[in-house]
């Protein structure tokens, strides 16, 4: 296996004598030198306000910004770069859709269909919109492995369903949801479909051209880029009919004292000076990912997941969630150690420089639905190694002992 | 960081055998404390007669630090007058914020003094103080009702 960590100096540094086994990629990923260098170069040579000035630096910043829009479109298989809107992150993109589309298109008879597995960012905005519009939120159930299922989907989509919004790859159990089926169903009932790709886009091929959702959102910082840059893909005809979300500079045509006409899509949704530095990082991140090949990333992570599941199961005190079948699972595993709360597990692992996430993972409804209080989550990226997993498993072996239980 | 300074024998014991963890059916107030960012959730049950906490217990789920901290706090306040309990809460929170090193004052915390090492672990401080904040709120409510 290639040593991708050579490009990730943060993973080569030693803290109290050892490197960090970084297994919290579902929260945020690390940046390769190529991304860090691109950001530095931009700030050294090209920084300027995009879309405004006529001078060299502004023109360059505009070019970088707009070229990346095209690169993102190509990366996810969108037909038109105008369908790509830069946001702060996936959360902001979901809020944009909720406020701009949901608030203006829903009424009291309508239903918003969410999956019980959704992240808070794909629940809370809808609750706010539902309260304002009177629309009803309906949840897709999941089985004991955290997977939604066809019978329930068929039962819950009906002529009142106006919005369907769910994760492609879930952030607690790592389930790939059958979004092709959902999107097809949505089309059948004229409901719009919103795919939260925050976990999927960094880890698997996501092709708008074949999936054809109405919206897809994802975050840059979960795929090697900076925090503070995210993407909203929307079908052009949907974006055209939507009202702006944030308003102000750069998103306008003419501003009179009491009336304003808005700029065209995508600029209509990008108010104020944008995060060009973040866009630069996203551009370099996409280059890096494409250089490895998203299919290769999938293969590497498949091996890691298989290995991790096998090793974790060797410890009889560790319960791994999501079942044995890895065919529709990717990039992460949730588990608990018998008698020990996940936060104590994370603290004890941290002592060995093994970084995992503990808690409810911003998915309280799902955690409760599964009868859990919290879980430990190890989430991988292509730069992880079997050795990282060995360190995870070894550290877990000592957890119960620290708390005075027999191991 | 030495894990034994965090997960001391005392914390392990209180966590493993939470003698004070029992629902109180005749509580005069049950106050919910919640750490939204990590999911720890405790309910503190108090039986207050006039100005005295005649009994206390807790229920809920949380990490070893929050469970042990709650259990120790209950040992400490059971039988105490409200204003005494408030004083103890104040000393505890000051200890965690490293605002106090008066030995005489700290001794009033009994076993809970062994929680002071969590002040060196910023991410776990909120686990340690959860029940103490909850007690403070509960006692304020009791005083309002009196």
Image (tube, coloured by chain):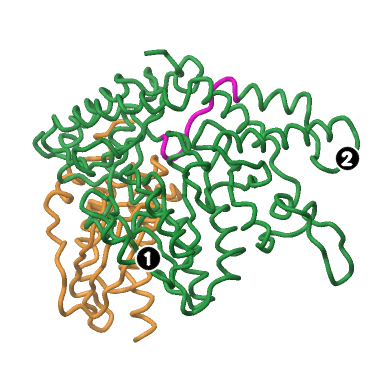
Chain colours: A green, B orange
Task: Write down the region rendered in magenta.
Answer: A25-35
Q: Report which residue position mark 2 lands on.
A: A53
At x 29%, y 42%, the residue is: A376
Is residue A68 shown to the viewer in this render?
yes
Q: Is residue A318 above or below residue A130?
A: above
**Label 2 environment density (alpha carbons within 10 Å; few <14, some 14–19, many ≥20):** few
Which quadrant of the rendered structure holds the C terminus of chain A?
Answer: top left
Q: Marks 1 and 2: which is nearer the front?
A: 1
Residue A375 at x, y percent in the picture: 27, 46
Residue at 64% of width from left, 56% of height from top?
Answer: A237
Residue A126, disc: none
The residue singled out by tag 1 in the image is A157
Q: How far separated are the C-alphas under marks 1 and 2? A: 49 Å
In the image shown, does A27 or A12 lie closer to the viewer? Answer: A27
- Residue A27 covered by magenta stretch: yes
Is residue B68 magenta-colored? Answer: no
Q: Is residue A393 above or below residue A328?
A: above
Say left or right for A181 vs A256.
Answer: left
Identify the secondary structure beneath mark 1. Answer: loop
Which secondary structure dominates the residues rendered in magenta? loop
Judged from the image, the secondary structure of the residue bearing numbered disc 2 is: loop
């Amino acid at each position: 296996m290639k040593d991708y960590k050579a490009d990730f100096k943060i993973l080569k540094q030693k803290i109290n004598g050892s490197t960090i086994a970084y297994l919290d990629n579902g929260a945020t990923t690390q940046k390769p030198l190529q991304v860090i260098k691109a950001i530095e170069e931009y700030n050294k040579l090209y920084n300027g306000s995009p879309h405004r000035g006529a001078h060299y630096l502004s023109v360059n910043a505009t070019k970088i910004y707009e070229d990346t829009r095209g690169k993102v479109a190509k990366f996810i298989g969108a037909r038109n770069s105008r369908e790509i809107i830069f946001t702060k992150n996936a959360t902001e993109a979901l809020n944009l859709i909720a406020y701009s589309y949901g608030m203006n298109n829903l009424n009291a008879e309508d239903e918003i269909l969410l999956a019980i597995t959704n992240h808070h960012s794909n629940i809370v905005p809808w609750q706010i919109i539902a309260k304002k519009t009177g629309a009803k939120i309906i949840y897709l159930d999941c089985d004991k492995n955290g997977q939604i299922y066809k019978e329930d989907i068929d039962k819950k989509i009906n002529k009142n369903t106006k919005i369907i919004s769910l994760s492609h790859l879930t952030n607690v159990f790592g389930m790939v949801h059958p979004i092709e089926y959902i999107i097809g169903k949505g089309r059948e009932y004229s409901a719009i479909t919103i795919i939260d790709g925050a976990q999927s886009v960094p880890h698997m091929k996501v092709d708008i051209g074949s999936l054809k959702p109405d919206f897809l959102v994802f975050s840059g910082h979960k795929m090697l880029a900076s925090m503070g840059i995210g993407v909203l893909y929307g079908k052009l005809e949907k974006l055209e009919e939507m009202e702006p979300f944030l308003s102000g500079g750069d998103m306008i045509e003419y501003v009179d004292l009491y009336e304003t006409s808005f700029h065209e899509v995508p600029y209509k949704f990008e108010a104020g000076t944008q995060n060009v530095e973040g866009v630069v990082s996203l551009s370099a991140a996409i280059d890096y990912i494409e250089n490895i090949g998203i299919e290769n990333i999938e293969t590497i992570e498949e091996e890691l997941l298989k290995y991790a599941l096998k090793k974790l199961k060797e410890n009889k005190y560790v319960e791994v969630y999501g079942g044995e079948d890895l065919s529709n699972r990717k990039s992460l595993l949730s588990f608990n150690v018998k008698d020990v709360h996940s936060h104590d597990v994370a603290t004890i692992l941290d002592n060995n420089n093994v970084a995992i996430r503990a808690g409810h993972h911003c998915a309280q409804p799902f955690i409760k639905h599964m009868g859990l209080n919290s879980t430990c989550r190890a989430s991988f990226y292509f730069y992880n190694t079997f050795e990282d997993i060995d360190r995870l498993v070894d550290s877990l072996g000592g957890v119960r002992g620290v708390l005075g239980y027999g191991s | 960081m030495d894990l034994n300074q965090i997960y001391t024998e005392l914390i392990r014991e209180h966590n493993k055998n939470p003698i004070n963890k029992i629902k109180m059916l005749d509580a005069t107030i049950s106050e919910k404390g919640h750490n939204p960012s990590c999911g720890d959730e405790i309910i503190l049950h108090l039986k207050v007669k006039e100005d005295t906490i005649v009994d206390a217990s807790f229920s809920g789920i949380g990490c070893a630090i929050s469970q042990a901290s709650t259990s120790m706090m209950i040992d400490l306040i059971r039988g105490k007058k409200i204003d005494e309990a408030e004083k103890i809460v104040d000393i505890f929170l000051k200890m965690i914020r490293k605002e106090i090193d008066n030995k005489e004052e700290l001794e009033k915390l009994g076993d809970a003094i062994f929680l002071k090492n969590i002040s060196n672990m910023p991410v776990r401080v909120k686990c340690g103080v959860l029940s103490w904040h909850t007690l403070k709120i509960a006692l304020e409510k009791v005083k309002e009702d009196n």
